[in-house]
Structure formats: structure tokens, C-alpha cells
């Protein structure tokens, strides 16, 4: 009898609580909660990523560039320019500047105003904080007694109190020194985001009255002030170049000789340079841009007045950097226990967890690793990220855009950027869906149909990557023709005695063969191609512009293999970009937007990696014309990091999610579930287990705690094929619809016509909006996914035939809940890759039957 009572009690306890196959421990405490966390230089060195602290203008993470890295360190795939990093913010103590209370009647003085933020002419900013702008104060705050000065700089920054002030004398007639709370709305309220290709529009002088323009341009005093403005910009450019050179030199010294002294010098130099940029930006904001009819001058002022988070008030900037440092502290320190080894709990993302996700084929081990890592990293930083969302609203305000979402896409100069990217995604989506369908079938064949449905999204943990964004590590499962080896010329390179120097000489010869510049002996004398034996060097591939118009270098620890050969050409493409725009002012010496530099380098990589070019170099003996080799080659390109077909969807999901939370379109209380909805929408990916708003899964991705934009990976990948197509068409190496000259076999080597296209695009730098650069060089004024579809057309046709042959479903259907606001009330059981595969009542029935059998057995045993 007592056996039966025991069984009934146990049964009641089991059936009373929903059974969830989910981790439930409380979040760990990773730090002591001190307000001084990560604010000393020593803590910063430990907590912030190297490339964010000091990195060169164009650093690579090695993805496809001579390194085995694919998603780690962490997916800092393409690096950033210094200008981008300054916009992202930098943690340093900055002295307050003392402004004199002076105004004048210069036509560039905004009627004597001294407002706090730049006049980007977006109109009054709206935010959660009530900000009232009263244009009537314009007239009330004029000072008509101000006098003109012939000196272009004003000592409005107290030089005696600020020894680092780059402006050291004179009076600035472009100053606006009165009410800091007045937002100047120009007489014509120019909108920076207007489409420059609509009829009768001038991008920087929209709807200007012709009579007003003529009146100003014919005014002698206006012309005198305009000349002073030009002199001001020239002097700012010269000083900015010197400051930039000193900063880059300090970073170079640190990365090529890592020790405490060079690290301290690098930190100090970066602080000085950021401070200089803040001063220049503040100076530029006090100039009335509505009276500047020269588009080039207007753009120069606009660009140098943008410093991103560094424009925040010092207390808010300190809070911004503290939040980032706290999140990065959690990210960098996260470790988990090994699968089925509860006493081995020192596994970090690099290298252990990254290797497990890449190499393990054990479903349960992969699921354990994914769940535990996301729990450890994400949950602890959710509160900090919610605070960051509020701070990003302030970042948007000081950069004069309406909300954090708009600020996120500010560098792309488009009022409809998100919609534009969605249009491009729809162009690419058929190829992606075909690829997704094929990969899902191969994974289902490997792991079994009980874990992967033929019509559902793919669980993210089995794709060879912690973030489900790269399939290259699962190539052993996915390769279309396993018996057809991929091209690898590494053995031939070793046989022929290739050296790092020879590889760079070949890259230089590639560019001179297409009518571009030689790099000169100084490049070879100053660059580092191999790991020195006498000191420690940070070996991430990177290209460096020392801002002097003649000193350009590369730092890379070159291996003798095919991947490094492509990487060397990629780095040399950055150097060519530096050479082509070196005649421009400092603020224009950059890509037309953050994606251009990378797109150019990858476009060159497409040409260098072709079998035709490898034959030309004598590294490939014969042409491989079999379609199986072609399909394997294109499939590898499609899933590899070089082409990033897969991260298209990931990049869109990631930054569209940030746009939504920064702009308030997505509520903080449901932001984790909103992310998984976007992943399912764009990627056809779902989490391996049910998620909730207790989690913050995006925190496991470095770009989230570091607050680094990700959309440029999408943009640069699409753009590289546009550039490549145009060069191939110009060189006659690609003829549409001609099977003898497909796009994926085009090699532009020794084709000056292709090089001239590239030179024209590079020489413009950032002096024009990227839409105009594309229109004038490629004949296309927008981002266009058709070139990518043309490149992969043979693969797409093969995937279509495969889907027909195997009767595979193309696309995916929503197959259940992936995330719940409250995990305790979810009422769901999670099994493998299916959700709702078995309902709770069914589970309870099985348990009841099992316990009744046990009870009967115990009764028989007792009798």
C-alpha cells in the first residue's frame, strides 16, 4: 500500500510543474559592481578589444585573409577606419573647454547664436526628452557690435588652460556664442538625407532661392568671409593631418613592439587625437552652413563636425563608456563548463568554444555549448544594454538626428537606408533560400529528420559557428561533390619557393598591370610582412595610412599558402586606395562610406582567386572545366567568409534589431524575442532551445557589447560584386549570357580598362556621397544585388535542379514559438530541433503509464 502512495505522491509532484529542457541557474556575478569598473588604463587594456583601442585604419580579422579565424576576436572581420572609431566613442578623460562669450555679424555666424549642437538641417530633433526650439530667439540674440577680424582662428578655447588646444590664437569670425538651447533651422531647412538624384535638387543646397544666392555671391564682404572659411579649413586640415600622423605612429609602434611603454604611448596619442577632433567638431558646429553654396566646403564642414558619442557631455560620455566597458568585461571573461564534465569550467570562446562549434558533430554537445555560452554572456549584460539604449538617444541628439536608429545609419547618408537594404535583400533572397534549402537537407540527412524538419528554420547551433552566421566549418557535410577536391595551390607555392616579399611584389605587379600606382621602396622598407624574432607583434592583417600623403604600410604575418596570397592582394588594395585619394583633404581621405574600402579589396580577391589567374601565375597546371569543380568552387565562395552570403541575413537581422530598439520601435521588455523573430524572418534560423526575456542572446555577439555597426558587412559584400562586374565588363572578360565568359571566371589582370574604373572610384574618396560615386564610376546610383546573382547564377541553377530532384521545400515556415516573454508560463516542452513536437499532456500520459508500470512491479515484488 505504501508503495502505491509513494508513487502517487511522486506522480503529483512531477505533473504539477511544467518540464522544460532549459537551463535555470541564476545569472553569475562576474564583477563586484563597483562604480569604478573598467575605468583605469589597466582595466581598459584588459577589457576592450585591441582593434577598438588602437587599431589601424583598415585591420582585418583574417577571415579569408591568411588566418583560420572565421567568427572570433570577434568577427571584427573588416576592421574600421580611425574616423569610424572616433564616431563610436573612446573612453578617456577630457578637459572642459572654456568658450568666450563673443559673437559677430559674419554671414557665417548663425546670426550670433552659439547653440550646442551642429546644424545638420534635419529640422528640430525629437526624442523622449522635451526639447523646445524657438527660432524667434535668433533675432533677440544678435550682437550687431561685433567686429570683423582677418585672422581665421578665434581664441575661444582658452589656450592657457588647455595646453593641448590646436587653435592657438586669433579671432574666429564664424563663432556663435549665445543661447545653447536654440536649434537653428536654416532659411531653407536643407535636408542632408534628400535623394540627390531627384530632378532639380542639389544635395547640399536644396531649394535655394536664386536671387538670394546671387545676392550673397556678389557681396564683397561675403566673398572675403568665404575666403577666410577656406583658409580655416586648410589650416584645420594641416593640423589634423599632423595630429593623425602622430596618433597612427604611436599605434604602429605599439602593435609592432608590444610592451607597457608603447601601450601607454598609444593610449596617450589616441586620447590627444580624439580631443583634437572634439575641438575641431565644436568649432565647425558654430558655422552657419546655410550660407555656404560650395558643396565641397559644405560637405567638409559636415563631416568634420561629426564625432559620434565623443560629442556627448562629459558626464554622459563617461556613462556611455562605462556601460560598454562593463559589457565587454562580461563578454571577455565568460567561461562555461565542458559537456558532461561539470568540474572543467574554464572553457572560453577563444579558443575552446570556437573549436567545439566548428569541429564537433555531436548535437547534444553543440546544444550544451550554445545554451551555456549565451546564458553566461548575455543574461548578465541585459540591464546594461537597456541603459545603453537610453544613452544612444542622447548620442543621436548631439549628432542632430531624431533617434538612435537614425544615428545608426548616419554614415550611409540616406533617409531610407533600411528600406533600401531590404530591397537589396529581396533581390538576393531567391539565391539565399535555395542555398538554405540545400543546407537544411544535408544537415537533416546527417542529424536525422527527428531533429530537423524539411520545412522549418534551421537550429542555429549546428552550422559550425556560435552565431549561425557562417557555414564554412560544416563544409565536410555540405560540399556538393565530395570527390572533387577544391583548388589549393599551397603545395605549388612551397615548391616554387614563394616568400612573403615575393607575394607582395606579385600583388604590386597585379595593380601596375591594370594601370595603377607602384607603391615605392618606402612601403617595403617600413612594412612588416613576417613575425619578427626579437619582439612581439600583433599579427592581424592590416593596412595603415599615416595621414602624411606618402607613408603607407602593411602589417601582416604572412603564411605561404593560397589564403595568404589572396589576403596580400586584399591588403595591397587598401594601399592603392590610400594612394589614389591622397590628394584630398584629410576629412575626405576615406571610403565613400564605411563599406567601400572592404568592397574594393574583396573585388580584387574575386579576380585573384580564379583558376585563370592561378594558371597565369604558374600555380595551376591545367584548367578545371568540369561542372562539378565549378559548383564546388561557387558553393565554397557562397558559404565562405570572403563572399558572406550567409551573413547577409545575419547582418540585416542584427542591425535592424538595433535600429528598432534604438528608435523605440521595439520595446525593451521584448527585445530578445524581437531578435529571434527577425532571425526567423531574414535567415530561416531558430534557437536550439526555447528562449525567454530572461535571456539576452545578442550579448554573445561582440558587436553588441562593443556597440559596433554590422551592416557594412552586408553592404560591402553586395558592392564588391557590382564593382567586379563593372570592371569585367569594361575589360571584356565578362559577356552576359555567354557561357564561355561567365562572371565567376573573370580575371582583370593586365586589363588597364578595369583599373581605370577602379582608379576613378578610389580617387573620389569621401568627397561625394556614395550614391554619386557609384553613379559616376559604375553607372549605377544605388546598391544592387543583381551582380551577385549573376556571379552565382550557375550555382543557383544547380541548386534549383537539386531541389526538384529531391523534392525539397524551398523556404521555411514558422514552426512554433522560439521565445516567450515569461519562460515559466511557456507550457512547452523542447526536444532537439523541434518545438511543440510533443505537448505537455502527451508527456504526462507517458509518465503516468510508466509510473503505473513501476507501481505494479513494486507491488508484485512486495508480495
Image: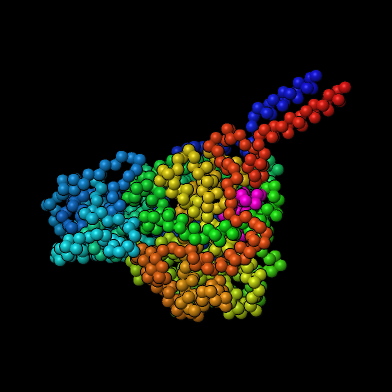
Check the picture and name the quadrant holding the N terminus: top right
Position of residue 837 relative to residue 596, above or below, is above
- The image position of residue 523, as x and y in percent, is 46, 72
Check the picture and name the quadrant holding the C terminus: top right
Q: Report the span colored magenta.
A: 452-472
Q: Is residue 785 left or right of residue 617?
A: left
Is residue 317 shown to the viewer in this render?
no
Q: Is residue 337 left or right of residue 603?
A: right
- The image position of residue 76, as x and y in percent, is 51, 57
Magenta region's main secondary structure? loop
Residue placed at 45% from the left, 79% from the top? Answer: 753
- Judged from this view, the residue extending furthest toward the top is 1
Residue 459 falls within the magenta-colored stretch: yes
Q: Is residue 218 left or right of residue 681?
A: left
Front-most of 646 and 579?
646
Residue placed at 56% from the left, 67% from the top? Answer: 793
Q: Is residue 522 left or right of residue 180?
A: right
- The image position of residue 168, as x and y in percent, is 26, 58
Amino acid at each position: 500500500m505504501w508503495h502505491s502512495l509513494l508513487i502517487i505522491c511522486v506522480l503529483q509532484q512531477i505533473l504539477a510543474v511544467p518540464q522544460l529542457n532549459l537551463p535555470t541557474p541564476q545569472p553569475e556575478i562576474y564583477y563586484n559592481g563597483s562604480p569604478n569598473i573598467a575605468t583605469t588604463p589597466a582595466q581598459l587594456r584588459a577589457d576592450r578589444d585591441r582593434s577598438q583601442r588602437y587599431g589601424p585604419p583598415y585591420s582585418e580579422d583574417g577571415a579569408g585573409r591568411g588566418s583560420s579565424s572565421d567568427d572570433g576576436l570577434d568577427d571584427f572581420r573588416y576592421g574600421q577606419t580611425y574616423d569610424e572609431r572616433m564616431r563610436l566613442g573612446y573612453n578617456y578623460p577630457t578637459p572642459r573647454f572654456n568658450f568666450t562669450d563673443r559673437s559677430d555679424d559674419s554671414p557665417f555666424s548663425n546670426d550670433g547664436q552659439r547653440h550646442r549642437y551642429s546644424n545638420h538641417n534635419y529640422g528640430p530633433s525629437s526624442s523622449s526628452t522635451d526639447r523646445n526650439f524657438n527660432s524667434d530667439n535668433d533675432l533677440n540674440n544678435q550682437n550687431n557690435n561685433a567686429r570683423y577680424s582677418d585672422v581665421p582662428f578665434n581664441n575661444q578655447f582658452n589656450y592657457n588652460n588647455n595646453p593641448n588646444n590646436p587653435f592657438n590664437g586669433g579671432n574666429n569670425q564664424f563663432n556663435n556664442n549665445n543661447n545653447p538651447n536654440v536649434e537653428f533651422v536654416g532659411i531653407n531647412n536643407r535636408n542632408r538625407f534628400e535623394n540627390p538624384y531627384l530632378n532639380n535638387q542639389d544635395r547640399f543646397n536644396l531649394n535655394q532661392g536664386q536671387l538670394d544666392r546671387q545676392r550673397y555671391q556678389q557681396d564683397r564682404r561675403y566673398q572675403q568671409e568665404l575666403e577666410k572659411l577656406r583658409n580655416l579649413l586648410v589650416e584645420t586640415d594641416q593640423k589634423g593631418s599632423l595630429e593623425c600622423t602622430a596618433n597612427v605612429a604611436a599605434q604602429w609602434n605599439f602593435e609592432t613592439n608590444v610592451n607597457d611603454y608603447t601601450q601607454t604611448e598609444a593610449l596617450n596619442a589616441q586620447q590627444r587625437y580624439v580631443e583634437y577632433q572634439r575641438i575641431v567638431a565644436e568649432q565647425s558646429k558654430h558655422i552657419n552652413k546655410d550660407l555656404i553654396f560650395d558643396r565641397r566646403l559644405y560637405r567638409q564642414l559636415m563631416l568634420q563636425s561629426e564625432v559620434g558619442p565623443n560629442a556627448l557631455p562629459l558626464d554622459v560620455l563617461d556613462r556611455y563608456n562605462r556601460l560598454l566597458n562593463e559589457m565587454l568585461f562580461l563578454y571577455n571573461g565568460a567561461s562555461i563548463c565542458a559537456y558532461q564534465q561539470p568540474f572543467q569550467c574554464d572553457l572560453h570562446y577563444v579558443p575552446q568554444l570556437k573549436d567545439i562549434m566548428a569541429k564537433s558533430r555531436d548535437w547534444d554537445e553543440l546544444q550544451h555549448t550554445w545554451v551555456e555560452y549565451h546564458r553566461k554572456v548575455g543574461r548578465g549584460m541585459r540591464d546594461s544594454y537597456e541603459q545603453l539604449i537610453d544613452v544612444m538617444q542622447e548620442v543621436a541628439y548631439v549628432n542632430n538626428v531624431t533617434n538612435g536608429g537614425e544615428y545608426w545609419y548616419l554614415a550611409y547618408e540616406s533617409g531610407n537606408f533600411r528600406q533600401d537594404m531590404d530591397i537589396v535583400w529581396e533581390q538576393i533572397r531567391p539565391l539565399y533560400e535555395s542555398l538554405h534549402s540545400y543546407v537544411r537537407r544535408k544537415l537533416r540527412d546527417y542529424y536525422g529528420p527527428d531533429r530537423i524538419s524539411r520545412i522549418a528554420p534551421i537550429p542555429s547551433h549546428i552550422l559550425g559557428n556560435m552565431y549561425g552566421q557562417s557555414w564554412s566549418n560544416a563544409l565536410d557535410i555540405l560540399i556538393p561533390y565530395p570527390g572533387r577536391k577544391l583548388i589549393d595551390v599551397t603545395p605549388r607555392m612551397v615548391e616554387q619557393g614563394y616568400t612573403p616579399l615575393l607575394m607582395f611584389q606579385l600583388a604590386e605587379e597585379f595593380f601596375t598591370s591594370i594601370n595603377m600606382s607602384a607603391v615605392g621602396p618606402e612601403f617595403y622598407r617600413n612594412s612588416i610582412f613576417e613575425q619578427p624574432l626579437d619582439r612581439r607583434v600583433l599579427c592581424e592583417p592590416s593596412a595603415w595610412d599615416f595621414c602624411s600623403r606618402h607613408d603607407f604600410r602593411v602589417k601582416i604575418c604572412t603564411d605561404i599558402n593560397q589564403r595568404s596570397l589572396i589576403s596580400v592582394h586584399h591588403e595591397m588594395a587598401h594601399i592603392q586606395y590610400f594612394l589614389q585619394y591622397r590628394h584630398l583633404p584629410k576629412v575626405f581621405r576615406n571610403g565613400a562610406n564605411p563599406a567601400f574600402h572592404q568592397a574594393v579589396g574583396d573585388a580584387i580577391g574575386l579576380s585573384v582567386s580564379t583558376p585563370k589567374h592561378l594558371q597565369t601565375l604558374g600555380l595551376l597546371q591545367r584548367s578545371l572545366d568540369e561542372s562539378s569543380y565549378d559548383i564546388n568552387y561557387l558553393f565554397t565562395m557562397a558559404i565562405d567568409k570572403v563572399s558572406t552570403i550567409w551573413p547577409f541575413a545575419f547582418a540585416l537581422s542584427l542591425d535592424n534589431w538595433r535600429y528598432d530598439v534604438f528608435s523605440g520601435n521595439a520595446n525593451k521588455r521584448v527585445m530578445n524575442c524581437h531578435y529571434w523573430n527577425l532571425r526567423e524572418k531574414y535567415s530561416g534560423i531558430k534557437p536550439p532551445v526555447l528562449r525567454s526575456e530572461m535571456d539576452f542572446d545578442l550579448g554573445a555577439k561582440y558587436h553588441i557589447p562593443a556597440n559596433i555597426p554590422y551592416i557594412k558587412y552586408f553592404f560591402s559584400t553586395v558592392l564588391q560584386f557590382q564593382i567586379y562586374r563593372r570592371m569585367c565588363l569594361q575589360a571584356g572578360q565578362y559577356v552576359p549570357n555567354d557561357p564561355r565568359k561567365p562572371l565567376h571566371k573573370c580575371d582583370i589582370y593586365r586589363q588597364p580598362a578595369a583599373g581605370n574604373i577602379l582608379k576613378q572610384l578610389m580617387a573620389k574618396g569621401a568627397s561625394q556621397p556614395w550614391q554619386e560615386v557609384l553613379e559616376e564610376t559604375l553607372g549605377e546610383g544605388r546598391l544592387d544585388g543583381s551582380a551577385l546573382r549573376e556571379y552565382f547564377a550557375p550555382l543557383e541553377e544547380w541548386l534549383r535542379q537539386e531541389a526538384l530532384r529531391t523534392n525539397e521545400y524551398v523556404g521555411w515556415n514558422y514552426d512554433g514559438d522560439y521565445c516567450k516573454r515569461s519562460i515559466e508560463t511557456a507550457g512547452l516542452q523542447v526536444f532537439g530541433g523541434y518545438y511543440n513536437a510533443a505537448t505537455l499532456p502527451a508527456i504526462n500520459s507517458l509518465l503516468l503509464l510508466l509510473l503505473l508500470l513501476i507501481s505494479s512491479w513494486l507491488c508484485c515484488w512486495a508480495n
